[in-house]
Amino acid sequence: MAIGGTILESKFAPSSTCSDGKRRLSALTPLILLGTGFWITMHGMVVGQARSKAIEDAKADGETDVEERYALPNLYAQGTSRHVKRFNAVQRSHQHIFETLPQVMLSSMVAAMEYPCMAAVSTLIWAAGRISFTKAYAACEGDVSKRYSNPLARYMWYGMLMNYFVGMIVCVKSFATKSIKN
């Protein structure tokens, strides 16, 4: 799909000689990444709320050493209670984002240099999948097998791979292009 998309874009999208066409299209990918970045920040606040609720619920159920096990600077809570599992799933939903975010950002920006439409489409596919996956993971109540319960969740991997391939095509094409000096 990535290769086919780049071929279609090469044939039908505004050419690089168009002064504004390609530049305007190139802004789509950063716009999607900025929007996703804002959403990631908001999801971080969900983690903080989940931590507070887990501490409150654990105390109400009579768990011991609650502050020591749940409170910051602990990234994850220690133990196996339902409150621990529920909180750790929310925390993991947020942490998981950062395992691939730098690669997605780099590959999508490189891809957007030459194929702005394809980069925007693949980044949007990644973002839709990422948000769906993260929300399902956070809502799974500790049953992490439910993190793919949203049908869009798997698309984060497809969008990411498409960006990798398109980014690599841009890099290979850059090395392969022969410059002509006058």
Image (spheres, rainbow, N blue to C red):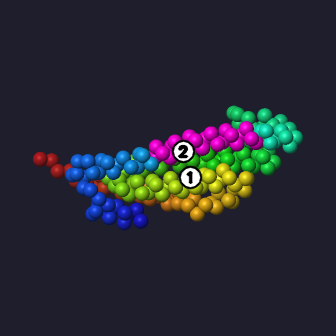
Q: Please name the amino acid that badge 1 sits on.
A: Ile
Q: Is 75 left or right of 179, judged from the image as shown?
A: right
- How far across and down, in percent of the image, does residue 68 sit? 78, 34
Measuring 40% from the left and 54% from the top, which residue is drawn there?
120
- How far across and down, in percent of the image, does residue 25 sit? 33, 51
Q: Which residue position holds label 1?
A: 131
Q: Which residue position holds label 2?
A: 39
Mark 2 and mark 1 in contact? Answer it, CB < 8 Å: yes
Q: Which mark is residue 74?
A: none
Measuring 59% from the left and 55% from the top, which residue is drawn there?
133
Q: Is 107 left or right of 73, judged from the image as shown?
A: left
Range of magenta residues: 33-54
- How far across and down, in percent of the image, does residue 38 sit? 52, 42
- Magenta-drawn stretch, dominant element (helix, strand or loop): helix
Q: Is 55 left or right of 153, judged from the image as shown?
A: right
Residue 38 in the image: above or below residue 17 = above
Measuring 51% from the left and 43% from the top, which residue is drawn there?
37
Q: CA distance from mark 2 to mark 1?
A: 8 Å
- Residue 41 in magenta? yes
Measuring 66% from the left and 42% from the top, which residue is drawn there?
47
Choose the circle earlier in sequence order: 2 or 1: 2
